[in-house]
Amino acid sequence: MFGYYIIKCCLPKVVSLLGAFLLLLSQGHALDCTLVCQLCTRTQIQCFNLGLISVPRNFPKTITLITLSRNNISRLIPTDFRGFNRLSALFLDNTGLVYVHPQAFFDLSNLYYLHLNHNQIQHFHPGTFKGLTKLHYLYLQHNQIISIPGGLFSDLTAIRYLHLEQNHLGILGSEAFANMPNLHTLHLGNLLTRIPSHTFGGLKHVKRLALSKNPIDQVHPFMAATLKILHLANNHLSSLRAEVLRPLASLAHLLVSGNPWECNCQLLDLRGWLLSSSLIVSIRCQSPLELCGKALQNINVKEIGRCNTTLAPLALDARERASTTNIVMTSVKLDTQNAAFKVKGSPITFHEFGNENERTEKLTSGLPVQIPIEYTSVNLSIFTGPNNAPISIKPLYICEQLDVKCIKISSQERQSSQRLKFIM
């Protein structure tokens, strides 16, 4: 009977005290984190998956790591991390964050890792990351960010890895990634439909750029020559100009699968680049129907249809053509001892020959000798060999610069058109 009386009398008070303790715990005001958190030392705090609704106030200022993942903290205010100037790693992922005050990280001058991923953040004030000059890793993926204000990352001069994938970014401004000279890796799988050519202009040392899973339908030249890994998979690309890829001298991996490639004349330039490149790239046609599923590199030019192509057939191995510099006769006067020529680093089109009588521009040979002009016949046969120049409708001389010997290919009919190829 007495025990029943004690329970009946004290139980409400025990429940009340327990409720007050849980309330203090949920609000982060527990007096001793060692009784609540998984780990609480002078340098490390781990309070994850505890249902906290705010950042506790009783953490020692000497800590270097705080883990608050998987709680219910929806807001960060200026006093949450005030005085934590030794903190190097802060984990706030999966906490339901909606709002971050512009001065929430103001005192974290030694912060190296910052995890804000898997939350519901939509906006950042331009000064949110001000002063974080030692930050190397910033994780913002899987939020609801819709824009990047100019100057948001301008203080992150040491940043190396930036994750922004799986947000709601539709447009990138020209100043989005300004003053980030050490950025190595950038992930941007969002809702981007286009990439302005100046967006990545300041990223001089970026090595990895992931633009997969965007509705991008067109790409302009915009990347640094230091880029080694480029991901453009699962976009809306039906074509890609080779001039986007040519400046990427360090490129070692290119991922472009999952795009609706349309294998028409516009892809011939890209096909030539692929044949001349050492990269293994998978581009399979989605249209037209008769080419669906075929690899672009394996398609014969005749299968694509009639295109305004160059004289050098793309069916030939582009590796041979890429290493050849063509020196083509563009204007010849038979009463002079000097040959005028035009130097090109790419195959010559039909339109570039034109009518010789209408061409007046010429370059005087800079060689230390003069090349005498001789009449030769027209030879329209294909000239083959390991170092071919593109096929021409003009006669061909092969000249060796060492002893300046010219070998005449044919001498049957007199023609005024001539062509020279110098093998340096």
Image (spheres, grey):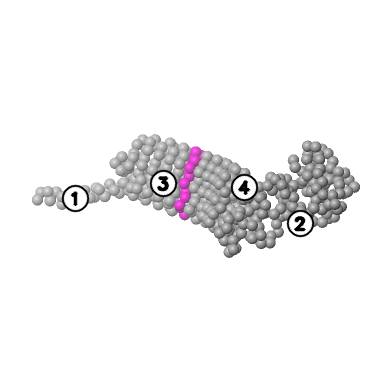
Query: Real-space Cα distance between discs 3 and 2?
Result: 62 Å
Mark 3 or mark 1: which is in front?
3
Say the numbered circle drawn on residue 92: 3
Q: Quadrant of the C terminus?
A: top right
Q: Residue 120 versus residue 13: which sits nearer the camera?
A: 120
> Is residue 420 found left or right of 57 in the rendered image?
right
Residue range corresponding to the magenta coloring? 132-149
Q: Which residue is found at the position 48% from the left and 44% from the top?
A: 138
Q: Which residue is mark 2?
A: 351
Please report whichever mark, 4 or 3, sits nearer to the chain's N-terminal start: 3
Crowding around mark 1 (Cα neighbors within 10 Å: few <14, some 14 to 19, many 20+) is few
Q: Which residue is found at the position 60% from the left and 43% from the top?
A: 250
Q: Secondary structure at mark 1?
A: helix
Please report whichever mark, 1 or 4, sits nearer to the chain's N-terminal start: 1
Question: Does residue 140 belong to the magenta stretch?
Answer: yes
Please report whichever mark, 3 or 2, sits nearer to the chain's N-terminal start: 3
Mark 4 or mark 3: which is in front?
4
Say the numbered circle drawn on residue 21: none
x and y, in percent, of residue 73 in the image: 38, 49
Q: Secondary structure at mark 2?
A: helix
Query: Real-space Cα distance between discs 1 and 2?
Result: 97 Å
Q: Which residue is mark 4?
A: 277
**Callouts 4 and 2 close, C-beta under 8 Å:** no
Query: Real-space Cα distance between discs 4 and 3?
Result: 44 Å
Mark 1 or mark 2: which is in front?
2
**Callouts 4 and 3 close, C-beta under 8 Å:** no
Give the residue type that dot 3 points to.
Leu
Say the numbered circle drawn on residue 11: 1
